[in-house]
Image: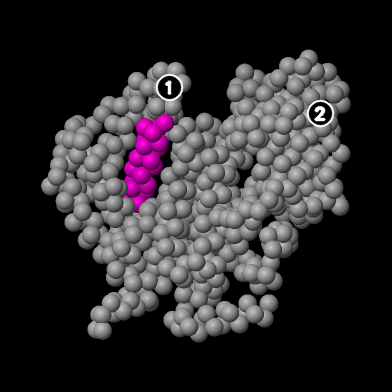
Amino acid sequence: MARTALAELIRHGNPEIHEQLQEILSNPDFAVTEQQSQEQRRLNAYDQLRYLVGKLGSSKTIATDLPSLFAVFDWSAVLATDLIPLISGHYNLASGSLATLTDSDSAAPYLQDLDDASSVGVMLLTEYGCGSNIGFMETTATWDGDGFVLNTPHPRARKFMPSVGIPVSRVCVIGARYIDGAGVDQGVHLFTARLRDANGDPAPGVTITQLDHQPLVIMDNSIISFDNLRVERSAWLSNDLATIDDNGVLTWRDEKSQKRAFPSAISQLTVGRMALSSCLNATARSALYVALSYANKRVVPMTAVDRPLMLDLPHVRDTLLTDLAGTVARTVYGNEIKTFLAGGDLTDRDTVVTVMLAKYFIQPHALQTVTHSRIKMGAQGMFSANRVADYLGVCHAAITGEGDCHVLGSVGGRVLAKQLGATPLPELRLHDPADPQDRARLLDARTLTIAHEAQPQLNNPALADRLAVIPAALDVAGAYCAAEALGMLDKHAEHAEIAAVRDVFALHYLDEHATWYLTHGLLDIAAVKTVQQLLGQAIDDLAANLPALLDAFGFDDEILGAPVLSDDLVAAWDSHVEQVRRR
């Protein structure tokens, strides 16, 4: 089997688009300045979106070429954080849905405007009442003999949060319950509408109220309600699963179609969940690159003669290097799933669950990594110029975007635990943490044991049991993904850097869950001490491989532009302040 280059393991897709995106997204014309108000930053983000679309070409092409789409998310998160809310709605949710869920003739009028960003796309799903649990949305789309009429039946059914406040032309994909000609609720379907016209004015029947200041993310979030918004018959995104006749009667294509309808409607959410997980991994890599590069230069005067590097301080070294191992593990894991999605069935239950689990495994760790990087950099971590602080908002937004992270993790973990219930438990015995194969067995054993322990509650439909099993479901989700990631790292352990990552990742996991392993008779006190000793050695080994690993991340110091990346910190800050003054 051919050896995969280290950089290819880290970066997913064609290197050319990664290079192109770095150039496009580092255009100084769209640099954010401290003089800009939130309103000006929102307008700047829309201008940058149009510039990005103009450089990349067809929005539909990007939306349906998943490696390219993921690259757009990654580099936007690293270099242009204000773009993340816009590219999610424009590329993934609107362009992607129109390109995949309806016929080309019906989609053409809308895709044409999205393709060159003369209209900006977004999806309207979440409501006050149901939040992201969109199966319970209450917006209605009623058949009127020639098309559909959308209404907000009461205030709690208003669409809450979509970014449509800025008055620009909008093409929106809207989730609503289809009420057929006989008045029967046929469940959630998707419809396309021009929410704002070419002048940016709301369409007849649409009320848009922009929400106020957000401290972490620059978004034009809004509250939207409908009062007899007319939608054309051809604007229904059926994915060819059903037909509607002139009397408004809905007929499913076959027995499976009705079951596939909701997964079909949320198929682009599945893509979006993975795209946001991918870009949070990218922010974590960038944060670590900046923080570790700085820590390897920053001299800490401790005495008149002792002046170690900041990276030599245990609380910096151990924290950032264990975060590094976890981030690389999740990057390799996420890249495998991204490759799978590019050729997979987005409506398949296993696909949906796989991405739910990945979101829970990847996103909170990225936030933890970015937070640690910001804190370990001290005062230098507070400034946007050094990039890391701005990543916090992206992480917070993503964790509650496309479905709340812990809700999805608990749902995915519940499904997984049910599937694993019939798998026999491994032999109960003490394991040797010095043996890499035993480490893998320990991760697998934790997954299966928690799943087995949860079976009584999983088999009881009572609300109390459904709530009580959530912690176990989350533990199953995390343990399963960690075991999978460890296996993927092991496949590429011919790279010394990946072998070092693997060892830190596995040993850190065992150390974190040492109490669990002790109480379940899988490790004893001596083995736990061995884990801690081995982890220290593994961190030393990872430190020795750090330069090659950071180089494989593919960041350009000049493009990142962080003053802390310079060998002359004082001169770099002087230059940065002068550039800010001239803007």
Q: Which residues are magenta?
A: 470-491
- Indicate the quadrant where residue 238 lies: top right
At horizontal 35% and vertical 23% (from top left) the residue drawn is 455
Quarter of the image where the C terminus is located:
bottom right
Tell me the crowding category of disc 1: few under 14, some 14 to 19, or many 20 or more residues within 10 angstroms, Cα based: few
Farthest residue in the top direction? 182
Farthest residue in the left direction? 526
On screen, 220 above or below 425?
Answer: below
On screen, 108 above or below 247?
Answer: below
At horizontal 62% and vertical 53% (from top left) the residue drawn is 214
- Indicate the quadrant where residue 122 lies: top right
On screen, 409 above or below 420?
Answer: below
- Indicate the quadrant where residue 108 lies: top right
- Mark 1 vs mark 2: which is more N-terminal? 2
Tell me the crowding category of disc 2: few under 14, some 14 to 19, or many 20 or more residues within 10 angstroms, Cα based: many
Which residue does the numbered mark 2 point to in the structure image?
Answer: 148
Three-letter amino acid code at the position of disc 2: Phe
Which residue does the numbered mark 1 point to in the structure image?
Answer: 464
Three-letter amino acid code at the position of disc 1: Ala
Indicate the position of residue 348 as horizontal and vertical percent values: 54, 32
Indicate the position of residue 265 as horizontal and vertical percent values: 65, 33
Q: Is residue 52 left or right of residue 246?
A: left
Q: Is residue 338 left or right of residue 579?
A: left
Q: CA distance from mark 1 to mark 2?
A: 40 Å
Disc on res. 432: none
Secondary structure beneath label 2: strand
